[in-house]
């Protein structure tokens, strides 16, 4: 074998290792899409489905976490967004009854190596309601391998209870402990969702406070200033301006955040959901 041929072979063998060393960018979105209820009138799901899924398609995040998704909404989203594969089960029975906190990812970019759903309660493996929560609450996860970069990400999407203060606090502790136990060596973590918890709350602090398994709020470490209003819940009122978000994207300490935004897209004053979607541009690897 010639020296040139040996060099080419060595270069090809080194590709996977080199891919892990490079900087790779990912866009992530969390979006509470509001369940379909007739009492929403002109803001009910049939009137906003196309605007919502078109927004996601245009933004083209690499992975997206959605909350408050009923079965027929899940089916509609899957139809409208064929570029994504979605995972997760419904919270009431672990099958199709009740809301999903489903997690979608780009079919072209990622290989799914594992996924599941657990309940935010003292009995995570089975459908259950925890502590003082008004409703069953879940977290859906996926372990994704970037086919080009050869790196793996552990991505988790959740929806905390809107009533139970103890439930939100315990859910934060549970999910942080779960991630810490499941995270593999060299794996990057993204946790996102509707936490029903502002940045001044105890559940938020339980996720970011220093210590084993701590995550960082992508909004606070973004290299460019946050774009958009601080608040993320609107109740379909485009003029509403809450002081703090309740929808967050958290990342592990090996992830850099380049940009962070709350998107306020609307059509003639009509919003696609009663929450704004939150997006973050992430960078992982050397050179970020």
Image (tube, rainbow, N blue to C red):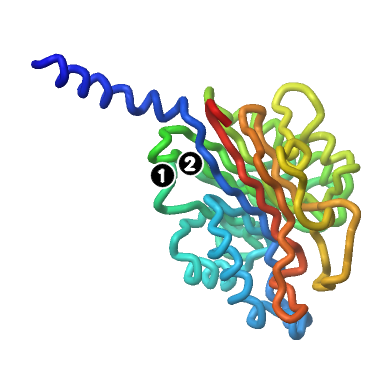
* Residue at which label 1 appears: 111
| Residue at screen point 53% across, 55% down | 104
Mark sitting earlier along the chain (2/1): 1
- Residue 50 to residue 265: above or below: below
Could you tell me which residue is drawn at 47 percent across and 58 percent down?
84
Asked whether 210 or 118 is in front, the reply is: 210
- Cβ–Cβ below 8 Å for labels 2 and 1? yes
Near mark 2 (Cα within 10 A), the count class, few <14, some 14-19 or many ≥20, is many
Q: Where residue 76 appears, x then y in whole percent?
A: 53, 72
Identify the element where label 1 is drawn: strand
Residue of label 2: 144
In the picture, the quarter occupied by the N terminus is top left
Which of these two is toward me, 221 or 2? 2
Q: Position of residue 151 (x, y in %)?
A: 46, 33
Q: Residue furthest left?
A: 1
Return the x and y of residue 202 as percentages of the image width and height.
88, 39
- Relative vertical location of residue 161 with respect to residue 50 in this rendering, above or below: above
Determine the image quadrant of residue 242: bottom right
Residue 234 appears left or right of 243: left
Neighbours of disc 1 within 10 Å: few (<14), some (14-19), many (20+): some
Identified at 57% across, 73% down, the residue is: 72
For the point 71% across and 38% down, the residue is 223
Q: Secondary structure at mark 2?
A: strand
């Amino acid at each position: 074998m010639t020296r040139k041929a040996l060099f080419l072979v060595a270069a090809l063998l080194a590709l996977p290792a080199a891919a892990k060393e490079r900087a790779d960018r990912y866009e992530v979105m969390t979006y509470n899409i509001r369940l379909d209820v007739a009492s929403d009138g002109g803001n009910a799901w049939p009137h906003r489905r196309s605007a919502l899924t078109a927004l996601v398609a245009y933004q083209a995040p690499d992975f997206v976490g959605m909350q408050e998704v009923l079965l027929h909404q899940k089916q509609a989203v899957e139809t409208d967004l064929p570029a994504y594969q979605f995972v997760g089960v419904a919270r009431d029975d672990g099958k199709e009854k009740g809301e999903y906190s489903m997690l979608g990812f780009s079919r072209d970019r990622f290989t799914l190596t594992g996924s599941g759903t657990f309940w935010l309660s003292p009995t995570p493996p089975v459908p259950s309601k925890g502590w003082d929560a008004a409703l069953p609450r879940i977290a859906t996860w996926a372990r994704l391998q970037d086919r080009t970069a050869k790196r793996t990400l552990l991505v988790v999407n959740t929806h905390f209870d809107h009533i139970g203060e103890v439930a939100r606090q315990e859910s934060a502790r549970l999910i942080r402990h779960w991630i810490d136990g499941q995270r593999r060596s060299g794996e990057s973590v993204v946790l996102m969702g509707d936490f029903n918890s502002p940045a001044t709350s105890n559940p938020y602090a339980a996720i970011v406070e220093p210590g084993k398994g701590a995550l960082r709020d992508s909004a606070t470490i973004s290299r460019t200033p946050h774009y958009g209003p601080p608040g993320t819940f609107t109740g379909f009122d485009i003029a509403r301006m809450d002081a703090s978000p309740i929808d967050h994207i958290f990342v592990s300490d090996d992830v850099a955040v380049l940009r962070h935004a709350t998107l306020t897209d609307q059509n003639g004053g009509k919003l696609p959901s009663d929450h704004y979607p939150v997006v973050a541009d992430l960078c992982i690897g050397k050179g970020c």
